[in-house]
Image (spheres, grey):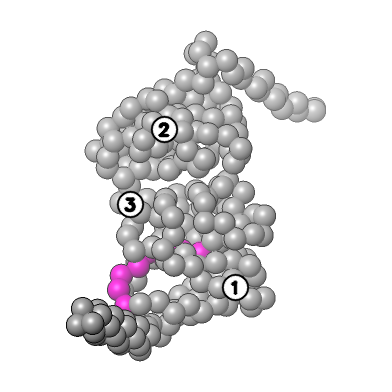
Amino acid sequence: MKKSVILFFWFTAFWAMSINVSAETIKNMALVKARVTDVDKKPVKGAYIFFYDSADTKRAVDLVSPVTDQNGYCEKEVPPGQFWVLARLKSNATFDMGPLMIEDKFSGDPIEIEVTPGEVLELDFTVMDLLDTIKNKSKKREDLNKVSGRVINDKGEPLTDVFAFANKHQSPLSVPDFFSASTENDGRFIVYLPNGNYNLGAAVSLTSDQRYKADQPIKVAGNLDNLEVILVGVKNKPVEETVVND
């Protein structure tokens, strides 16, 4: 009987403590108000705001907002702390916490925020597809290294309209960590990378139904040029000649 009373006491104390912690957490929650627009500044309906408790955003998300309304707005209560936040719009209009696909739109590099108890924070995001993100980010690259070269086939011919990419790991990914715009007639590419070790690769197209494996290791500690990435078994597209009529 005495043992039962002791167990009941500890259970009651634990239950009371849980209620207090829960109430305290709710009391300290901050409110994040977000608005999502596209590159034309039009509101985006159906987007989500993803909250991560670290800078690693290539993993399962920690907190997710409700979907944005027709005016591009949504709100999310979050506990105090530091978060890395981005907006994401799935191409198939369904909620999915999986890896980012080529067809999806997102807001690029995450915004780092620090929220305090009871704070109301307003954030604005612009979502675009991955290729538009490349063009947008390439306008401002002072803090990154320019890595350039050519994509060629196994015969040494430059390849046109293909993509170079760089991954932190050799294992195949559904979306590369970094990738270039499509190559010109001379096969030239440019990828902007932070300092670190990477693996280079190339692909004929960017689609979400393939895996991107890079197996050419490079060490980046400054700008690199004249690199060659080989795509085996790919023929170069013939260069279109411009006919000038007299």
User: Which element type, helix, strand or loop, lies under badge 1?
Assistant: loop
Residue annotated with mark 3: 142
Q: Is residue 7 left or right of residue 187?
A: left
Q: Is residue 84 magenta?
A: yes
Give me the residue at 50% from left, 13% from top. Answer: 154
| Residue 160 shows in the view | yes
Is 141 on the left or on the right of 231, as rendered? left
Q: Position of residue 34 (x, y in %)?
A: 50, 76
Mark 3 or 1 closer to N-term? 1
Please say if 88 is above or below 9.
Answer: above
Q: Quadrant for residue 19, please give it.
A: bottom left
Distance from the alpha carbon under mark 2 to that under mark 1: 34 Å
Q: Report x, y in % for residue 103.
A: 62, 49
Q: Main secondary structure of the magenta part?
A: strand
Residue type at numbered disc 2: Ser
Find disc 1 in the rendering and name its residue.
68
Q: Amino acid at mark 3?
A: Glu
Kindly report the distance in space between the C-alpha atoms of the residues bearing marks 3 and 1: 33 Å
Q: Position of residue 193 (x, y in %)?
A: 35, 42
Please give the range of residues in magenta: 80-87
Q: Is 167 or 185 nearer to us in this picture? A: 167
